[in-house]
Every structure is written in C-alpha cells, then in structure tokens.
Amino acid sequence: MADETKARIESELEVKAYIQDLKYALKNGAKIDFQAKRRVDENRDEKYTNQYTVNTLFPDENPVDALKRELLTLSVENYMQTVKDYRFPKRSEMREFGKVYNEKDDVYIKIRVELLGMYGNTTTFVMSFHFAEKPFSSEIFPYRAI
C-alpha cells in the first residue's frame, strides 16, 4: 500500500458512487487495460505478480473477461483506500480494494478509471490484481461490516 502522505479514505458515499460508475462503465463498453507484466514485478516473488495471480485463479479464462467479471463484484466492503499517482499527477486517483478468493487467498486490487479521448471512451486500468504480500487485517477496510 502507499505511504500515508499519498493515501486518503473517501466517504462511504463517494466509494459507492465510484463503484457505481465503474460498473456502469464496464457494462457499457469500457476497455480494460490489464498490466500482466510490470517492471515492478521483475524483482518480486512471482506469486505476487498480476500474471501469476490471474493465471492461478482463472486458469481457463481470458484474463480481461475474468477481470471484468471480478471488478463487477466489488463493493464498498472491499474498499481500502484512495491513492494519488504522483508519477502521473494529471491522471485520476487510484482506488485500492481487497478480496478473498478460495476462503484463504487475499488479493490486492488497484484500479484507475479514466475517460480518454474526445469521445469519452472509458478505460479501466487494472494496475494490480495480485495475491497480497501480507495477509489482510480488518483494520484496512474502513467500511467492512464486522
């Protein structure tokens, strides 16, 4: 996760609106840009890479189709925080979510939704969709029901 100076917790209403917009975009032709191979993964244990995680969880599926389906299941309870991208300050903020698969596998999800081009083509950038390097704790989910 990002250091505290780059992260903030949005209100529950803001998160719900974001998820609603995300789902609307995905159901209406938004393109998913999935980074299967990332430079940051070169020195990372393969188990914590996007490609390994998607191939492990969805072995017989097109990765983009699987990710679209999984993003459509996100809820406010999965939200962790919102982060500013200081490498690309003009770009929209990124949202971090967490989901548990197979009752034991914590998966870290970081996405950015942007309108691109003069015709308002929506693109969902999936920066991260990988097994979490540290197990999730309930404190990192501000809106999870206990």
Image (cartoon, rainbow, N blue to C red):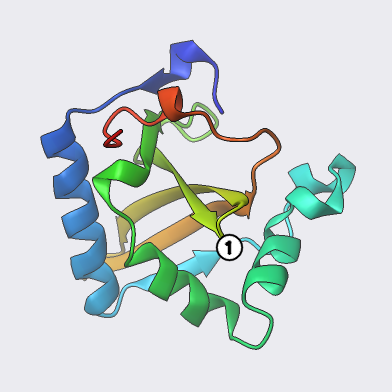
Neighbour tally class for label 1: few under 14, some 14-19, many 20 plus, Cα within 10 Å: few
Q: Nearer the viewer, residue 43 or 105?
A: 105
| Residue 65 against residue 16 in the figure, above or below | below
98 relative position to 123: left or right: right
Residue pictured at 42% horizontal, 21% vertical: 7
Task: Identify the residue under disc 1.
Answer: 102
Q: Residue furthest top?
A: 5
Q: Quadrant of the N terminus?
A: top right
Quadrant of res 139: top left
Q: Is residue 120 visible?
A: no
Which residue, as the protein is rendered here, is positioned at the far bottom? 60
The percent coordinates of residue 127 (x first, y second) are 55, 51
Q: What element carries label 1?
A: loop
Say which residue appears at 26% left-offset and 44% top-offset: 76
Residue 102, image quadrant = bottom right
Q: Which amino acid does label 1 sit on?
A: Asn
Residue at image coords 55%, 56%: 103
Quadrant in which the C terminus is drawn:
top left
